[in-house]
Amino acid sequence: MKPDIQPSDLPILDLDAVADELAASGRQVKVLWQYPGSLAFVAKGRDYRSEFHINASDEVTYMIRGTMRLHHRTPEGEESVAVIPEGSTNWMPPNTEHSPRFPSDSFALILERGRLPGEIDRFRWYCPECGVLIHEEEFVVDDYTKDPVSKAYARFFDSEQARTCDECGTVMPRPDQQIN
Ligand SMILES: [Fe+2]
């Protein structure tokens, strides 16, 4: 992918304007730049975000608009929530299982690094009833403009088998089947 912004540009971007552009576009993600040492994108919230993402990059979040509830799992498998208010920032170490939950009128700036050759991003869903892992998707994220999160969602929600807990039989509903 040829980036819009060249290194010599020393880009300065108005985050409110990027959020407005993203809201108008109907897309989930606007990549600002993408280089081996720095990947920056603005993400629009997903009302029904349910999966946990695992990747080998550090991750910095800055809330441009709205509040994020950053669900994350400890190495012992405990779920915890970090609340990041508008105008605040957070750092997460590599390989933290995390699920950034914020509404669709909210926007976050995310800073990572590009993936190294062979690195794999993982997306995991846990049973809402009994808590066991029910499904995992793997992606090689060579280009973040391909919106790997949306692709992982499509694969998961299109398969009832993927959404069914082998342990207790609970079926995680598709977003369009959820009340709120
Ligand atoms: Fe279950």
Image: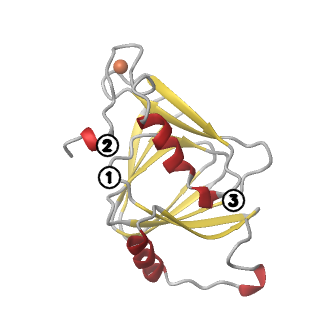
Q: Which residue is mark 2?
A: 175
- Is ligand 1 within 8 Å of the beta carbon of the residue shown at mark 1? no
**Real-space Cα separation, disc 1 to disc 2, in angstroms:** 9 Å
Q: Residue furthest right?
A: 117
Say which label, 3 or 1, has the lower sequence index. Answer: 1
Say which label, 2 or 3, has the lower sequence index. Answer: 3
Residue 21 vertical position relative to residue 170 in the rendered view, above or below: below
Residue closer to the observer: 98 or 35: 35
Give the residue at x 48% y 29%: 77
Where is residue 105 drawn, in percent x and y?
32, 66
In the shown orientation, is residue 160 left or right of residue 129? Answer: right
Mark 2, secondary structure of its residue: helix
Where is residue 86 drawn, in percent x and y?
36, 69
Residue closer to the observer: 61 or 125: 125
Residue 121 appears in which quarter of the rendering? Answer: top right
Q: Which residue is mark 1?
A: 47
Q: Residues within 10 Å of mark 3 (few under 14, many from 20)?
A: some
- Three-letter amino acid code of the residue under disc 1: Asp
Where is residue 39 drawn, in percent x and y?
66, 64
Give the residue at x 43% y 22%: 161
Residue closer to the observer: 32 or 64: 32
Q: Residue furthest left?
A: 179
Q: Which residue is mark 3?
A: 113
Where is residue 33 drawn, in percent x and y?
66, 71
- Three-letter amino acid code of the residue under disc 3: Arg
Query: Is residue 76 among the parts visible in the rendering?
Result: no
**Real-space Cα separation, disc 2 to disc 3, in angstroms:** 30 Å
- Residues at discs 1 and 2 in contact (Cβ within 8 Å): yes
Q: Nearer the viewer, mark 1 or mark 2?
A: 2
